[in-house]
Image: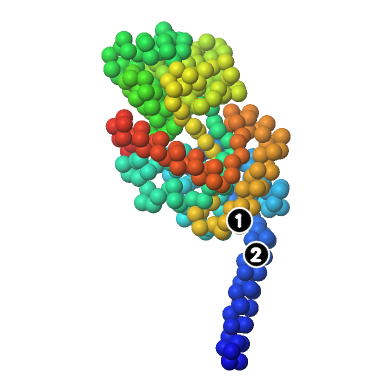
Amino acid sequence: MPVTLLRFSLMLGFCALTAGTAAAQKAGEFPSRPMRIITGYLPGGVSDTIARTMATQLGEQMGQRIIIDGRPGAGGTLAMEIAANASPDGYTLFMGQPVITISPNFKRRPSYDPIKAFAPLSVIGLGATMMMSNPSIPANNVQELVAYGKTQPPGKLMFGHSGQGSTNHLAGELFSVMSGVQLTAVAYKGAAANILATVQGEVQLSFLPVLAALPQIKIGKLRAIGVTGSKRAKSAPQVPTIAETLPGYEVPVWYGLMAPAATPKSIVGKLNLEIKKALSVTAVVDRLESQGIETEYTTVAEFEKLIREDAVRWANLVKTSGIVLE
């Protein structure tokens, strides 16, 4: 080989080695400055509490401060867009929820694909949602509710929810499709207003976070009909799942940390392992369970699978029910 060509080949090899070493050092040094978690909901809510709990624990583990960047508005889509467009360097994370898998079905859907815009890190946990009724409804369980509903004019029974396209809205729509009982959806601003409307009989049914509903159940102002998850809630094990009567019914309310899509795989892997470590800390688990969140670590591949399945579920529901999400 000519000397010039040999020198050129050696230089290329050296550059490649140097670049690889630099990249490895960069990943190994991560994080070297403060990080942030973007959330799309108001302080004090479940999403905000999860983000703060994880930020504190992950920050301690990685030796960096992690701040909460709250961007409420537009049902969580505002925060989602900001997070999707953030620099993919691992320093900006997103507190992901089903808005990612539901929003592609909105009439005014995002200009980008939310599902492809993020690199899933790990699920943090699943939230329990409960179907409640005003005690005036002569039904103590799903079977009795379906039987009663079929004696009523279509649409007479109304259910409250916290916003179009929310999981508790779609929980009611899915119930209508699977039970054959046509319900009318009524939107309220948050769980408190939803509870009040159901207690006062303004609507007969509602879908609420379990922890928000339990106090009303204990004093007899609301009746528990069923939970929307695939298994009974730890905080209310006596309440059956809706799926025990309507097989296949499931509305998972998941919470998980995500990063912008182009985040290096080495950093994604590191963050996944840090989340796994955090979710093994008893204080973290206890704090989240006090908010009705059943913690669940997943691998990146398992989280990706959950998102794909969730997206198919909502797309099928919107198509089957004919609802239009504005």
Which one is nearer the viewer's eye here, 201 or 296? 296
Real-space CA distance between mark 2 and mark 1, rounded to the nearest whole angstrom? 10 Å
Picture coordinates of residue 25, whole percent (x, y) = 67, 65
Q: Secondary structure at mark 2?
A: helix
State which quarter of the image contains the C terminus. top left
- Tell me the tag on residue 314: none
**Residue 165 appears anywhere in the view:** yes
Q: Label 1: how many residues lie within 10 Å, few (<14), some (14-19) or many (20+)?
A: many
Picture coordinates of residue 11, whole percent (x, y) = 61, 82
Three-letter amino acid code at the position of disc 2: Ala
Three-letter amino acid code at the position of disc 1: Ile
Where does label 2 land, which residue? 24
Picture coordinates of residue 5, whole percent (x, y) = 57, 88
Which one is nearer the viewer's eye here, 120 or 222? 120
State which quarter of the image contains the N terminus. bottom right
Image vertical order of residue 137 relative to residue 210, above or below: above
Which one is nearer the viewer's eye here, 137 or 178? 178
Is 75 positioned to the left or the right of 291 in the image? left
Q: In which quarter of the view is residue 123 placed? A: top right
Image vertical order of residue 309 relative to residue 243, above or below: below
**Residue 158 appears anywhere in the view:** no
- Farthest residue, direction bottom: 3
